[in-house]
Image (cartoon, helix red, strand yellow):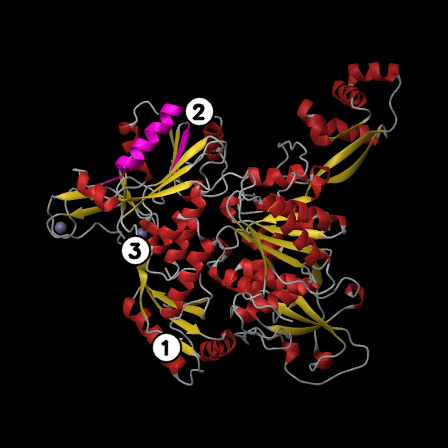
Amino acid sequence: MAVPPAKNTSLPSMSADQPSLFQSADLLPEGKSVAEPQGNGMRVARVMLEETALELDYLIPEELSAKIQPGTRVHVPLQNRRGTAVVLQLLDESPYGNRLKPISSTVGSRPMFTPSLLKLAQWTAQYYLSPVHQVLRAMLPEAVRSKPETFLSDSHLTLVQPPTADALQKLHKNAPIQARIIDILQSRGGEATLSQLRQQLPSATQAVHALVKKNILSRSEVRVERDPFQDEEFLPSAPLVMTEEQQAAFEKILQCLDSTEPSKPMLLHGVTGSGKTEIYLQTIAHVLTQGKTALVLVPEISLTPQTIERFKSRFSERKERIAVLHSHLSQGERHDEWFKIHENRTDIVIGARSAIFAPLQNLGLIVVDEEHEPSYKQDENPRYNARDLAIVRAMLEKCSCLLGSATPSLETWQNARSGKYTHLHLTRRTDHKNMPLVRVVDMRLEKRRQKDGVAILSEKLRVAIQKRLDQGEQTILFLNRRGFNTAVSCMECGSSVKCPECDIPFTYHKAENRLICHVCGMRSMPPKRCPECKSASLIYGGFGTERAEATLKITFPTARIARVDTDVMQRKNQLRDTLRDFRSQKTDILIGTQMIAKGLDFPNVTLVGVLNADLSLNLPDYRAAERTFQLLTQVAGRAGRGDIMGEVLIQTFAPHSPAIQYARRADYDGYAEQELEHRQHFGPYPPHTHAVLIGSRSKQASLAEFTLQNLATKLKKSLPEGIILHDPCPSPLAKAHGQYRFQMLLLADKIRPLLAHLKNVLSSMTFPEEVIVTWDIDPVSLM
Ligand SMILES: [Zn+2]
Ligand SMILES: [Zn+2]
């Protein structure tokens, strides 16, 4: 039974013989022109070129036959050059007969893709309408693809024939470095690596050569791994005692895991602080005892040293068998971590989005933590959602899939409610503390009260912070916008100063005294006069974290304040150090962007303030309210982790909006019910339907618009029933990076007819070179 990722619809088939999308025929090798079926004993490989989605057949030469399997990367001759390809299938015959050319060589010593990953590639390509070769490319890290199996090596030296005392004394006179080497080796029990020697004797290499020649030393080459956690120590940790609720959920998970029936995906729906990670850890321990492996996906932003430490400490006896994959690794580290997995030297992989393609074998469990996170969606081709691929991969590998969240996406929640997923609840914190008290501050009233126009800190929040300072407790303030002023506008003509490349206002950064575009990064001097009307009456309005910090410093002159956003967190380890200072109470107030919204656990924090809850609420996206609810719930979860009851203050100009009111009461179910109804009424939007967002962009606005209109006209013809096609319109971000952007939204009851129709129309069209057309299946953002 196929389990669709989001909705109750059938998925595109997974048959391998379906033609790949957008085949191009400009690379045909000479051998493939005549069809001449052949049987008897031929060994043929059907391969896909890595540069274009073209399937070709090649002969397998005798000497390579043991090494070539589905998933092996190979070099093949093309017309007058060499190409790299992936073997998809082995065949006994080919319609192109004995005119086939042989494969030239293999890349790497073993297949790079497991059979399951090949199937996952096919599925991904068909579902996201992305050419298979692009998916295969996305599955391998760059360093693995371009320089496979280039490991660092070192010489392992063994003292095999120690010289006599006399000989050694002589050596000290004639060849002092050789003698020192022998001394060092003897002090280390007769063994060392060359690089260890070099740390003490930088010029050891020559002397080592000489000693090997004399048969005093033996030398063998060993592989050295670039370990991103080489310098870290991990103290072993024991499993925690679980609460009754945790225990019940855990036992249900084990039942599903040990059942012989194919297991449904599971949703672990637990409030912040309810101990989801502990359940992951104990479930993984169970999976390992069965001799299976586990894959854990975590949003990039939560993949902190603390998260990794928790895993490495719990499984400290096999911490060597844990691999980590994320974007902050160096190319070399990523290469080595990947091959560690590939060579079956790993039991647990922890990684961000692309780790869904980690070549783990014998998978027993895939965990997707914070499954609602939009960062699981890849924002370039192939535009996959790693959460959804986790469910597909689990189905292909016949293993279990555990999704976790305090605020599940509506798609997942609906699947859990309808019984398609197993729904597990954790309603209380592990420490049995109450959820923090959440209060909403109506900033419309505040604004009337404050004279200077911009209300950053309400009186209520100011008093609450002062109380914490007096009591020696800590405060976290959250504002999801960087910079000092968020708009520079003209009092005369009303226009705001915008980035010339993007259709958004510049943000003023005071420390640098520059206007910075938050889309393309362009920097510019603040103008003296309005670029439109040349008037000198420019006003700086709005506020970001930089200005909020300045205001705090004035309001609380003796408080110790630290700021966390990408502007100040440039230095390596700066974030870690800032958080450490906060944890050890060297700081009183931490103000930051979403970098501080997740996962952080500080027992002395008793107050959390949200300075402007409306930022995400006002985005032109049907998910705006959902994102706001999720964010507020996450942020509120940071308060009252210790012994003292926590308090949360949310500042907003829209105090009655449902997202804010339900977040205030920590009522996920109430919120979800209401939001589902809302989406049914408008749209109807996902999860009631499937959405596809088609975009076009170009330096020429009219060309981008015309191309999309043209596509819309073609799509409207023979449009299958149950599909709503909205008219093309400018994107909410109407210009970015110098390109004008247009988009149209398609909504469908069932995804399969929509995909088929789209694929047909798209492959029948050619777009002007100056226009980029993109399509995003199940988009997570309409921006
Ligand atoms: Zn003006
Ligand atoms: Zn820009």
Q: Is residue 11 left or right of residue 235?
A: left
Is 544 or 224 nearer to us in this picture? 544
Residue type for callout 3: Cys
- Occupied quadrant, residue 199: top right
Is 463 or 301 nearer to us in this picture? 463
As for residue 467 lying within the magenta part, the answer is: yes
Answer yes or no: do the residues labelled 1 and 3 have beta carbons within 8 Å? no
Measure the alpha-carbon separation of dots 2 and 3: 41 Å
Q: Residue at x 20, y 51 (%)?
A: 496
> Where residue 631 sits: x, y (%)?
42, 49
Say which residue label 3 marks.
502
Disc 3: residue Cβ within 8 A of ligand 2's nearest atom: yes
Disc 1: residue Cβ within 8 A of ligand 2's nearest atom: no
Say which residue label 1 marks.
712
Is 738 or 62 nearer to us in this picture? 738
Mark 2, Cα crowd under 10 Å, few <14 / some 14-19 / many 20+, is some
Residue 126 in the image: above or below residue 543: below
Viewer can see residue 201: no
Q: Is residue 531 left or right of residue 410?
A: left
Say which residue label 2 marks.
586
Q: Earlier in the sequence, mark 1 or mark 3?
A: 3
Mark 3, Cα crowd under 10 Å, few <14 / some 14-19 / many 20+, is many
Residue 511 in the image: above or below residue 750: above
Quadrant of the rendering where the C terminus is positioned: bottom left
Which secondary structure lies at badge 3?
loop
Residue type for callout 1: Ala
> Where residue 633 sits: x, y (%)?
43, 47
Q: Earlier in the sequence, mark 2 or mark 3?
A: 3
Residue extent of the magenta highlight: 455-477
